């Protein structure tokens, strides 16, 4: 397709005619043949218009704001790992209940991934874009003010619930706005995750040790100590609260940036999928204006979309149903909206299993996510345990502990860079890049079994995280590319939910292995098996590099057409 020549004159009719002529020419060259429905043809027009807006100010703002959503995900996950011991000593939590904070956090992540994944395809990207971070900020700030274990657990669940939607939603949003030639940025989003670990480690390093009860406090919590005993008071253990308040403030700043400082426009692809053509055209114009392009109205017109609709109306029953659904949505009060939402969620789930090819892609994606999360959850929980069994774990000071967190997280940045680079290699693409990096992640875990020193342990832990970051970067970026816009959020959210479920189950399985006397090495082998399984299964995933978007009717797996 030729590039539109910009014209600063007031006569936009010439430009609109030129744009329409190009679209007609593209259709005659085979575009229409592949776009079986009018909705797919409209998606193609919208995608082409967004391509012309380029990688401008709006796209870079979206990338950075969504990237910071990735940062919040690991920032809070790391925070609870670091502050839980301090909460335990202050409140006198028995060891049997110590793991509840992690269970509730992961339960929130799991339910959040499912809920927000479904809602983003019903309510739109804009609501989820703001609500997930807003909820995380509010409940994150509340955690530091609580004094009861039950209250902390409840609020931690809602922090996880807000965070659960971040990765699937943010990747979907970025994918739907950036040009195809910049799709490597979907993988690059994951570079923000190691930053979250580093931020938390630095904040905790600065605040927690200076305002914390020593673990050797004779009487432990003052709640169970005799009067006058040397015990841990709230006033002497405020460090973890300072850290949580700081992280909450950072989360609040992210929400302010998203909601007040930046105006997020609803995704035109979502709007087209819901029969809201006029709004889709307006958003394309607004994005072009934000990017300071001349004559933004020449990129797309409602007349072009209507032409596709009328051309196919007689035979395209799917289109007519979507248009009517778009017109009726919002009528009938709150109860009607709830009913419509439930019905739409059910339709989206059915679409993920509409035909063998789509069902195969959906299930395979779920299993890959589950195998991936299975592997790195066991790695995070049991690599230190293996070191302790071998007598290699030194008695690190608090400062050394936080330093090691930074050392093992820094390789995540070049790991993400590796992933973003591999997907641009023509001989590899997304699929084979995932196959290779997942296998290397498993190999790194197996190699860890031979570690005998604390220094080597930090090094091999860093190597595992390097390949883990590379694999996850590609996987998270591939997922929204593989599914059509109408179910993209649902597909990404359900995949993330499957992974979160595996991250809850896998440490329990590994713990049972330990209780049977088989040692942490066996647990590590079980985790590595998940990485190797993901590597094998990735061979069967759909390649998305250099192929047409799923929105436009591209084959989700083996040459069939996606029914929009």
Image (cartoon, grey):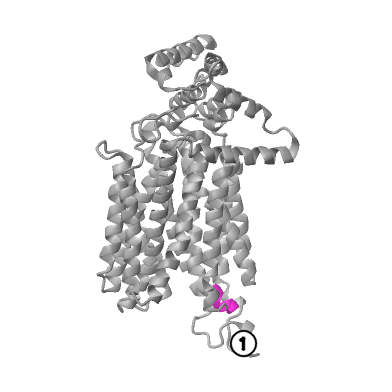
Query: Quick one: 135 or 437, which is closer to the camera?
Result: 437
| Near-viewer residue (482 or 425) | 482
**Image quadrant where residue 147 sits:** bottom right
Rendering coords of residue 506 (x, y %)? 42, 63
Instruction: Answer whether residue 2 is visible to the viewer in this image.
Output: no
Q: In this rendering, does residue 280 appear at all?
A: yes
Please name the residue shown 51% across and 74% down the image.
85
Majority secondary structure in the magenta region:
helix
Q: Which residue position holds label 1?
A: 225
Would residue 132 appear left or right of 533 to someone viewing this image?
A: right
Residue 465 lies, in percent from the top left, at 34, 58
* Horizontal side of residue 202 vs 346, given as left or right: left
In the image, residue 413 above or below residue 65: below
Is residue 147 positioned above or below 107 on the image? below
Inspect the magenta stretch and tell me whether residue 356 lies in it.
Answer: no
Whether residue 206 sits left or right of residue 151 in the image: it is: left
The image shows residue 107 at horizontal and vertical percentages of 54, 59
Q: Which segment is the magenta one?
A: 87-92
Count of numbered circles on the image: 1
Q: Nearer the viewer, residue 563 or 78?
A: 563
Viewport quadrant of the N terminus: top left
Q: Is residue 326 above or below residue 391?
A: above
**Residue found at the very far right of the displayed protein:** 333
Which residue sits furthest front?
Answer: 356
Residue 91 in magenta stretch: yes
Q: Is residue 493 left or right of residue 403?
A: right
Estimate the x, y position of residue 359 in percent, counting from the top left.
44, 40
Q: Nearer the viewer, residue 30 or 396?
A: 30
Element class at badge 1: loop
Mark 1 surroundings: few (<14), some (14-19) or many (≥20) residues within 10 A: some
Place residue 232 in its image quadrant. Answer: bottom right
């Amino acid at each position: 397709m030729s590039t539109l020549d910009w014209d600063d004159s007031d006569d936009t009719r010439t430009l609109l005619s030129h744009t329409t002529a190009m679209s007609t020419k593209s259709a005659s060259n085979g575009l229409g043949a592949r776009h079986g429905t009018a909705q797919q043809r409209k998606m193609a027009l919208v995608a082409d218009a967004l391509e012309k807006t380029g990688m401008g100010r709006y796209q870079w703002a979206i990338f950075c704001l969504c990237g910071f959503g990735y940062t919040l995900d690991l920032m809070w996950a790391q925070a609870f790992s670091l502050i839980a011991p301090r909460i335990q000593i202050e409140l006198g939590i028995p060891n049997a209940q110590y793991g509840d904070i992690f269970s509730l956090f992961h339960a929130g992540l799991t339910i959040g991934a499912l809920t927000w994944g479904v809602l983003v395809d019903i309510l739109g990207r804009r609501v989820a874009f703001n609500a997930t971070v807003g909820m995380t900020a509010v409940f994150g700030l509340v955690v530091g003010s609580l004094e009861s274990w039950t209250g902390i657990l409840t609020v931690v669940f809602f922090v996880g619930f807000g965070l659960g939607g971040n990765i699937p939603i943010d990747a979907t949003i970025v994918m739907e706005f950036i040009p195809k030639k910049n799709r490597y940025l979907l993988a690059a989003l994951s570079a923000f995750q190691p930053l979250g670990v580093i931020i938390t480690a630095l904040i905790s390093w600065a605040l927690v040790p200076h305002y914390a009860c020593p673990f050797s406090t004779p009487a432990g919590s003052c709640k169970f100590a005799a009067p006058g005993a040397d015990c841990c008071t709230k006033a002497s253990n405020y460090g973890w609260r300072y850290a949580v308040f700081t992280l909450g403030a950072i989360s609040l700043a992210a929400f302010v940036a998203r909601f007040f400082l930046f105006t997020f426009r609803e995704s035109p692809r979502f709007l087209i999928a819901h029969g809201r053509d006029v709004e889709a055209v307006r958003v394309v114009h607004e994005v072009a204006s934000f990017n300071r392009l001349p004559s933004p109205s020449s990129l797309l017109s409602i007349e072009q979309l209507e032409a596709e609709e009328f051309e196919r109306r007689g035979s395209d029953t799917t289109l007519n149903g979507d248009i009517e659904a778009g017109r009726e949505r919002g009528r009938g009060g709150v109860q009607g909206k709830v009913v419509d939402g439930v019905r739409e969620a059910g339709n989206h789930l059915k679409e993920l299993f509409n035909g063998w090819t789509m069902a195969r892609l959906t299930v395979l994606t779920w299993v890959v996510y589950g195998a991936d999360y299975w592997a790195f959850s066991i790695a995070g929980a049991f690599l230190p345990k293996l070191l302790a069994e071998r007598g290699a774990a030194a008695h690190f000071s608090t400062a050394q502990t936080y330093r090691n967190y930074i050392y093992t997280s820094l390789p995540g940045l070049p790991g993400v860079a590796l992933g973003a680079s591999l997907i641009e290699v023509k001989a590899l693409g997304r699929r084979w890049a995932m196959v290779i990096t997942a296998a290397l992640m498993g190999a790194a875990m197996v190699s860890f079994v031979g570690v005998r020193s604390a220094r080597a342990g930090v090094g091999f832990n860093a190597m595992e995280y390097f390949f883990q970051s590379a694999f996850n970067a590609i996987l998270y970026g591939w997922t929204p590319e593989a599914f059509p816009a109408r179910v993209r959020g649902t597909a990404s959210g359900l995949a993330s939910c499957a992974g979160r479920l595996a991250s809850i189950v896998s440490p329990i399985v590994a713990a049972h292995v330990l209780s049977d006397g088989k040692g942490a090495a066996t647990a590590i082998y079980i985790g590595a098996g998940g990485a190797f399984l993901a590597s094998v299964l990735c061979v069967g995933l759909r390649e998305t590099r250099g192929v047409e978007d799923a929105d436009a009717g591209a084959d989700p797996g083996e040459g069939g057409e996606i029914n929009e």
